[in-house]
Amino acid sequence: MKALQTICKQLRGFSVEPALLAGFCTSSYSCGPKKKNPYEEVDQARYSRLVRSVLSFRDPVQTPESLLEEDALLFGPVSKAKPAKQEEARAPRNWFPIFNPERSLKPNTGQPSAPLKIRLQRNSIPSVTRVLQRTMTAEQIFYLERWRQRMILELGEDGFAEYTSNIFLQGKRFHEALESILSAPGSINEGDDSVLHCGYITSVQHLLKDVRGVRALESAVQHGTLKYAGLVDCVAEYRGELCVIDWKTSEKPKPFLRNTYDNPLQVVAYMGALNHDANYSFQVRCGLIAVAYKDGSPAHAHFLDAELCSHYWAKWLLRLEEYSEKDKKDKSPDGQEPGAGEDAAGAGAALPAGAEGSRPPAH
């Protein structure tokens, strides 16, 4: 560039023909006005002061506090939302103990020759199943309905009805087979394929080895004070502890107690009723939820000790109170409950154990 400027100064003293000048200016360097660089128009001194001020503001090592200060300076104060208040654990308004202080905690030595099997009386007292169905959470209802709609899309209305019917039929046969095995141990022949070779029975074989001293099978219980009833699958000793045993079937693995949804409430409801039912002379302090699988894979056993049963008992009392409140609101002015509509809704809520977000159907 300097060389070009020197040449131009020397040429000022000579008269150059326009044609020659035009030819000269076609070289790689232009003699016309120089194009302006936008960066040269920036006030360099002011820019340097701005850079120094920003760099001097920043700490050598950034910390969460300094970052928050910078964000507040650049973007303004943060609008913080109030944290959601955690729902306080509610206590039942009408407390009633799950265990009966009037009954001895010592195991009875005089065991009856045959397990008790008291028939369930159909009356106005709600069943445990009905109470749990009527007080399901909105989330449970949502998942049940979503599962039902998905199954209907896959199978159709008739196919879904047949599917649910088969599920309930399998559950019924499973309970009947267990009743036969536990009521008279050794009475089932080894070659009885319909019982011993059933996938569900195969699934619970390792649990049956630890079941002893059966006291009741498919026997009704009723709580005279709290006004509810139910049908207990089994009351027996499991690994030395007398338990209310609830046999369940499922199409999905349920390795954790939380996977059983409302089943613990069902067990403790039966337990509380049994402990205060005059038809039973003994008291139960533990529970067991046994989940069997059709493919014969080992069943999952969920044991509830006395402390855990007390925990779920409080939750059951709350559900019972909620049911009573809903029952009062649903009654018509003449004091009679609505008929088919409500009962149909309740029955529809009891879907098979494979339903996403549902609980297995209970007795």
Image (cartoon, grey):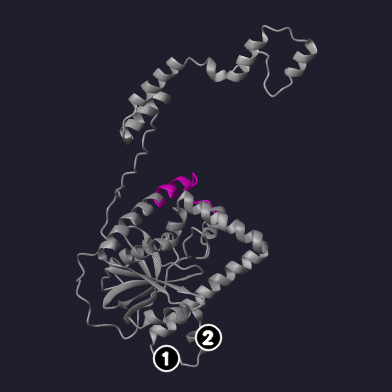
Q: Which residues are drawn in magenta? A: 323-340
Q: Amino acid at mark 2?
A: Ser
Q: Residues within 10 Å of mark 1 (few under 14, many from 20)?
A: few
Asked if residue 342 shows in the view, the reply is yes
For label 2, the crowd category at 10 Å Cα-Cα, with few meaning under 14, some 14 to 19 and many 20 or more, is few
Tell me the mark number nearer the camera, choosing from 1 and 2.
Answer: 2
Question: Is residue 76 something that shows in the picture?
Answer: no
Residue 265 lies, with reference to residue 23, above or below; the image says below
Inspect the image, locate mark 1, and give the three-letter code of the amino acid beneath it.
Answer: Ser
Element type where label 2 sits in the image: helix
Element marked by disc 1: loop
Q: CA distance from mark 1 to mark 2?
A: 14 Å
Picture coordinates of residue 254 (x, y %)?
44, 67
Which sits earlier in the primary sequence, circle 1 or circle 2?
1
Q: Position of residue 25 (x, y in %)?
A: 72, 18
Numbered badge on residue 187 = 1
Quadrant location, the N terminus:
top right
Q: Is residue 17 above or below residue 96?
A: above
Specify the label residue 194 is tagged with: 2
Counting from the top left corner in percent of width and height, residue 63 is at 31, 35
Instruction: Determine the residue positioned at 74% across, 21% down.
Output: 26
